[in-house]
Image (cartoon, rainbow, N blue to C red):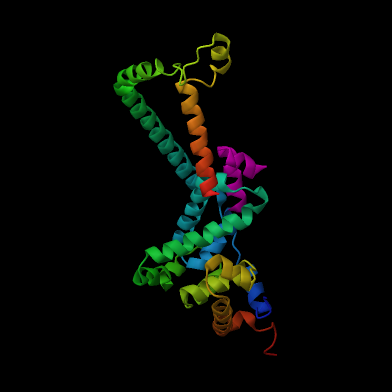
Amino acid sequence: MTTELDPRLQALFEQAEQTFDSERFLGDVMRRVDRQRYRAMLLWSLFGLVVLIGFAFVASPVFAAVNFVSQFLPMSVVEVETEWLQMLVSPVNSIAAAIAVGGLLIVKFFRWVLR
Amino acid sequence: MLVGLSRTGDRDAFAELVSRRQTWIRNLMRRSCGNADLADDLSQQVFMQAWRSIDQLLDAERFAPWLKRLAINTWLQHRRRNDPLEAAEEHSEAAIAQQDAPGIAMDLDRALATLPDDVRLCIVLSYHERMTHAEIEDFTGLPLGTVKSHIRRGTQKLQELLVAYLEPQGSEA
């Protein structure tokens, strides 16, 4: 694929190869790298701070909502009269279990659709 | 090893990589753009880009071609960003003359500067990087036929301009 190349020109390109002072160049590159690392660190710190402040603002209502919802989670979906049967099905017979199973089914469904 | 360490954010390993590859990338950039200062600035951009995206490089063995691709993309992006007048200034005689390059390199850069951008890129990738036409097509996105004709045209032009270097020694005798 390179049959059209002139070997004399190729030799000329080789002769024109230069060696450079690497120290200054390396120093410049690493200064830019350090500046970028510093900037990234600063941005992440700012992001963390914003998240913390945001969390402080919404923590109280979020905890109240979680508390409110959590009291309904252990409630049975279907009332079972027999005590031993009630204990047997209790892991799956709750609102929490229904939400978990529903979530799993939704994920499976989307995976199947997007396959 | 160095690539693997750099991927984890090891600064010293990356510095060693820069140190080892800088001559190659700077030469490639100088042949491509013909301006020493601009070439060094673009080379720095290439290594910065490498630092930012080295974690995306899955195969450490492919570091050199990956870096070359970054260099070519950096050059192409720079060309797209700049207007033709500015580009002409970059390749002006004055810009080339200010280089601290030996005569042969300066003459080669002067001859390369007379070629249109795409032709010069194909010539540099072909002669400097020893890339095949198919590889140049892949790297630059130019059609294979265009790559071939650019190399043919560029070669002819360089042969005319650099005839003094290409004549066999003692041919006058």
* Furthest residue in direction front, as rendered: A81
Prevailing SS of the magenta stretch: helix
Viewer-nearest residue: B9 or B55: B55
Residue A10 lies left or right of residue A51; in this view the side is: right
Q: Is residue B147 magenta?
A: no
Position in image of residue A68 (x %, y %): 35, 17
Residue B150 lies left or right of residue B80; in this view the side is: right
Position in image of residue B53 (x %, y %): 52, 47
Viewer-nearest residue: A114 or A86: A86
**Quadrant in the rendering for residue A58:** top left
Image quadrant in which the N terminus of chain A is located: bottom right
Viewer-nearest residue: A101 or A6: A101
Instruction: Identify whether A65 is placed above or below B10.
Output: above
The residues colored magenta run B1-21
Instruction: Identify whether B90 is placed above or below B169.
Output: above
Position in image of residue A85 (x %, y %): 57, 14
Q: Residue at x 42, y 62 (%)?
A: B78
Q: Is residue B9 magenta?
A: yes
Instruction: Identify whether B24 is placed above or below B166.
Output: above
